Amino acid sequence: MRNKILVVGPPGSGKLTMLKELMGTVSPVTGSHAGIIEEYHIKNKYYEARVGVWVDEFLLEGDSTQLSADRIEGLVSLPEWTESFCSNEAKEVRDSIKAVVFTLRHGSDAAHLEPQLKVLEQLVGMLDNDNWDGSLICLQKGHVSPELAAQLDTVCFDYGFEYISHLVSEQGETTGYDRLQEAIEVLGWETQDEAKETPVPDPILTSPTLMARSSPSLHASSFDARSLSLSPADSDMLKGLLNDDLDNFQNIFDKLKIARNSNLSDEQRTRLANDLAEQLIGGEVPGH
């Protein structure tokens, strides 16, 4: 069941501002916004639903020299981000997405936007199949001139996106965050009762793009027990495990780092703990 919203854009493109406008409040965040998980409570006269929101980020040219190190930690370029999200490992996450909100920086023009949407064509092609009833939205931060809005609207239309700006419509059409809310709610999300019956993948466990927040590849020779607060004896044991199964331990270690840096609910932490336990023992977790 597709019941998630993916919000993605470069740093400084208004992702958190958008979430605050939609939901009223979001959890405090420091550093990169990649890996943020929130819940959007939709309640109108037609239905009530709780929709998961996943936030991810990528770097544009020049960001690495203009932004602080903690703000860009773990982030990659848009082509690398797209390649990861289009991988086989991310299929389960892709199959849960019903809406993509691409956030555009204030002041960006058509020359900035079109190359970005061009890179996203591969992902859009994977999402926009015969079974997909979702929506592609491009939301620009800040106010724009009517001329620029018209140009950006044309570019977005060519790539299958709806362009939303904060420009006041002379025809009285809904714009800005109000239009974004309309575009999301009209999709008709599954109700809370339906959601209880439909398990969905947790991006913290499956998405390679969110795994990018973790450390570079681990090697047994350079493993430092202090990063996990382990005793020397436990460190020696883990080094042995690393030598036997480096890829498996790399995966477990990365997920631990993500859990530490993400705003996970108790339920998500429980799922993560069960997943890691299953990987450690190499079998099913009792009772699950």
Image: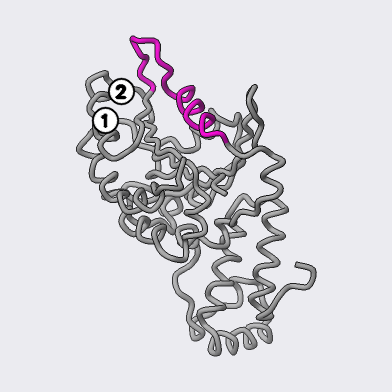
Residue 177 is covered by the magenta coloring: yes
Amino acid beneath label 1: Leu
* Gap in angstroms between the C-alphas marked 1 and 2: 10 Å
Q: Which of 198 and 107 is in front in this view?
A: 198
Asked if the residue at tag 2 contacts the one at tag 1, i.e. Cβ–Cβ closer than 8 Å, the answer is yes
Residue 69: percent from the left, percent from the top? 41, 54
The picture quadrant where one finds residue 47 is top right
Give the residue pinned by disc 1. Answer: 152
Q: Label 2's element?
A: loop
Residue 225: percent from the left, percent from the top? 60, 77
Residue 25: percent from the left, percent from the top? 61, 33
The reply, left or right, for residue 151 in relation to residue 38 is left
At x 28%, y 45%, the residue is: 116
Residue 141: percent from the left, percent from the top? 38, 30
Give the residue pinned by disc 2. Answer: 144
Q: Which colouring convention does the figure follow?
A: one colour
User: Outermost residue toward the front?
Assistant: 130
Q: Label 1's element?
A: helix
Q: In this view, does 23 lie above or below 217?
A: above
Residue 124 is covered by the magenta coloring: no
Q: In this view, does 53 lie above or below 92?
A: above
The reply, left or right, for residue 39 in relation to residue 85 is right
Residue segment shown in magenta: 166-188
At x 50%, y 64%, the residue is: 214
